[in-house]
Image (spheres, helix red, strand yellow):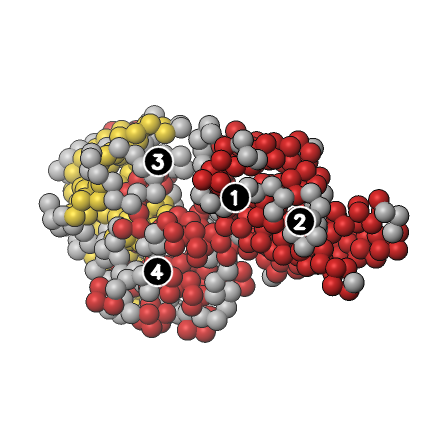
Amino acid sequence: MTTTIHARFRCAFPGFDLDVDLTLPSTGITALFGHSGCGKTTLLRCMAGLQNAPGTMTVLGEPWQTEEFFRPVHKRPLAYVFQETQLFPHLNVRKNLEFGYRRIPASERQIEFDDAVRWLGLESHLARMPAGLSGGERQRVAIARALLTSPRLLLMDEPLSALDRASKQDILPYLERLRDTLAIPIIYVSHSTPEVARLADHIVMMEDGRVVAQGPLQETLARTNNPFRLEDDAGVLLEGRIDHLDPRWHLALFQFDGGQLWLRQDDRLTPGDRVRVQVLARDISLALAEHSDQSIQNLVPAIIDQVDPDVAPGVSLVRLLAGPTPLLSRLTTRAVDQLALAPGKNVWMQIKSVALVD
Amino acid sequence: MIETYWDPVWLTLRLATTTTLLLLLIGTPIAWWLARSRRWLRQPVAAIVALPLVLPPTVLGFYLLLVMGPDGWVGQMTQSLGIGLLPFTFEGLVVASVIYSLPFTVQPLQNAFEAVGEGFMEAASTLRAAPWERFLFIAVPLARNGFLTASVLTFAHTIGEFGVILMIGGNIPGETKVLSVAIYDHVESLEYAQAHWLSAGMVVFSFVVLVTLYALNGKARAGALR
């Protein structure tokens, strides 16, 4: 009870009825994931108290909202990063950063001004006005400004969605570093699969104001009966490390709990790196024997765990276990029938494509 | 002679300054409320604030005279407080000017407050700013052009007022004889030279005020884009 975040809200909004009852972990990044209009931003606003919806909100044992009482936003130890940054246009970067920072008593500060400035690489921007910053720089200022309130909960509403690809790539490493170095739980609203795949530890999938699936990221994505219509995006994330590089073929060997895969070498990879890779269900085909006379480089033995129909007719989703690690394969139902694929059967996974998540 | 010639000018400036300062104090909360409130009461209040724009100044002056006179409720109140009666005093002019120029303060401020995005206010609240801090440190600085416009318009409008003043202030030198009334007086007594000096001065003054206002607003707009 005291080490979790608990949110329960029931309220009618235009377009959907919000009805959630969630218990979230107090560490790492929890992604609120869903299509636009599913209510994820509204839920985040309710959690913050920016939207006053009937319900309860308890953070690490501290009640923020109950049926009888509503703590106003400015008295909650939270920080919020908005999609549109909302940097104050009449204040320079330093003043923006100090706005929340100087409202926190010195004894309660856990993040110092210079640290946040350094983490987000803002040293040379302090005297600039927000209007002169690029999109990526603005969002970095917004993140630093939020952190400087030393929040107990950090809420982020699609912080990357208004940015171009290059700016996104610019910010993602900062977010990863925050996740890995700060002990602050982060709730991160997103509709982008790659972003969630790269950042999240825990996922809450929403549809029509309701939670349709939730759990640890890898485990949740590897379910065949996922009520969330992922279809082409169905797939799993593997977490592991780079074992060694093969400069001749520009390949890197990725080792995970249950097997190893060759990745196309990327200049950024060095042995020992911990990375996440995404393997889509449509990129895994199955064979009953190990065929080496073919072009696919990644062959991994696995045991079939479960076979379920996918959303589209004639397509099946097969859940496999390579060691303890679950993977998904998307096959035609005819192939499932011809190879007599059934739980418990030993197969070889032929993995056509493995993508480093970035 | 020089003394009395300048008297109406100083009196007018004193009246306009006092009115502007008072109206900034009174008008700001009204404008803030009108900009933020979603209650039904908003429309009637907005209409009352705008009334001086459409009413003939004589109507306003007539009712003020009645209300502040010996039989009016305000008059009875001021008498029982030992202030005496307001009509035909400088204080009476101030009260009338505040009411007469109210829309010139409230409307620019209301527009400016409405233009301050709700998002900035929400961001400030997530940065621990209490409501009064959000108002003082976010809304007011972001609405600074509205304050400038409101001050200039109120000041200029008070200087130009005539009908209300004649109704409740009369024509007492050094007390209620402001510029516009002095010009009227000069014309009545066929002192066209003096009337010319004061009138031409008013034309120049008004022109300078408006040009300055437009220039400042234009500059502020260009500044926002930069």
Query: Residue under mark 4: which chain is it in?
Result: A
> On the image, which quarter does residue A170 sit in?
bottom left
Instruction: Name which residue type carries label 3.
Output: Gly
- x%, y% of residue B222? 65, 58
Please tell me whether mark 4 or mark 2 is closer to you in this view: 2
Q: Nearer the viewer, residue B215 or B191?
A: B191
From the viewer's perspective, tell me whether residue A328 is left or right of residue A173: left
Query: Residue under mark 3: which chain is it in?
Result: A
Please tell me whether mark 3 or mark 2 is closer to you in this view: 2
Residue beneath disc 3: A39
Residue beneath disc 2: B176
Labels 3 and 2 touching (C-beta < 8 A): no
- x%, y% of residue A29? 26, 52
**Residue drawn at (30%, 29%), measured in percent from left and top?**
A11
- x%, y% of residue A75? 27, 51
Q: Circle 1: is it few (<14), some (14-19), or many (20+) Cα within 10 Å? A: some
Query: Residue under mark 2: which chain is it in?
Result: B
- x%, y% of residue A306? 18, 35
